[in-house]
Image (spheres, rainbow, N blue to C red):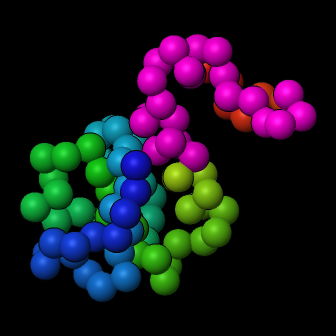
Amino acid sequence: MAGLATHSSAEPDTLVVRVGFEERESFIEDAPDTYYLTEYYRPYPLVLVRLPRVTQDALRELLSSSYRLSLPKTRLRHGRRRADGTRLFHS
């Protein structure tokens, strides 16, 4: 889902986040100072995120989206629920 970038091609303080290929291109086009890619990571459905540049809200949305990509399809179909029974995600 997400982790610190460890390959030498990534800048320091970079997070690697799983995203779809189309979504990745949108992130990079919309905010190239925050999101980027290196040749090493290009073949994978990931985006690199400069942690000092990303806002809390943007990071929260990005991680939520990445989490949904990581869920098995059956869990997505039924939706996740909080302890109070309200849904977290809708399919």
Indicate left or right for 21 with 90 as reference. Answer: left
At 40% across and 75% down in the image, what residue appears?
50
Tell me how many marks there are.
Answer: 0
Rendered location of residue 69, percent (x, y): 44, 34
Whether residue 76 is in magenta: the answer is: yes
Relative to 86, is 65 above or below? Answer: below
Name the residue at 16% across, 72% down.
Answer: 7
Does 72 appear in magenta?
Answer: yes
Q: Position of residue 76 (x, y in %)?
A: 56, 21
Q: Quadrant of residue 60?
A: bottom right
Measuring 43% from the left and 36% from the top, which residue is drawn there? 70
The image quarter in which residue 90 lies: top right
Q: Position of residue 53 (x, y in %)?
A: 49, 79
Vertical placement of 27 versus 73: above or below? below
In front of the other: 19 or 71: 71
Q: Is residue 79 left or right of residue 82?
A: left
Q: Is residue 72 left or right of residue 77?
A: left
| Front residue (pair 86, 38) | 86
Placement of 76 over or under 40, stated as above or below: above
Quadrant the C terminus occupies: top right
Q: In which quadrant of the rendered view does residue 84 lie?
A: top right
| Residue beneath the point at 16% across and 65% down | 38
Magenta-drawn segment: 64-85
Q: Give the residue furthest to the front.
A: 83
- Can residue 83 be seen by looking at this rendering? yes
Q: For this view, does 9 lie left or right of residue 68?
A: left
Residue 29 shows in this picture: no
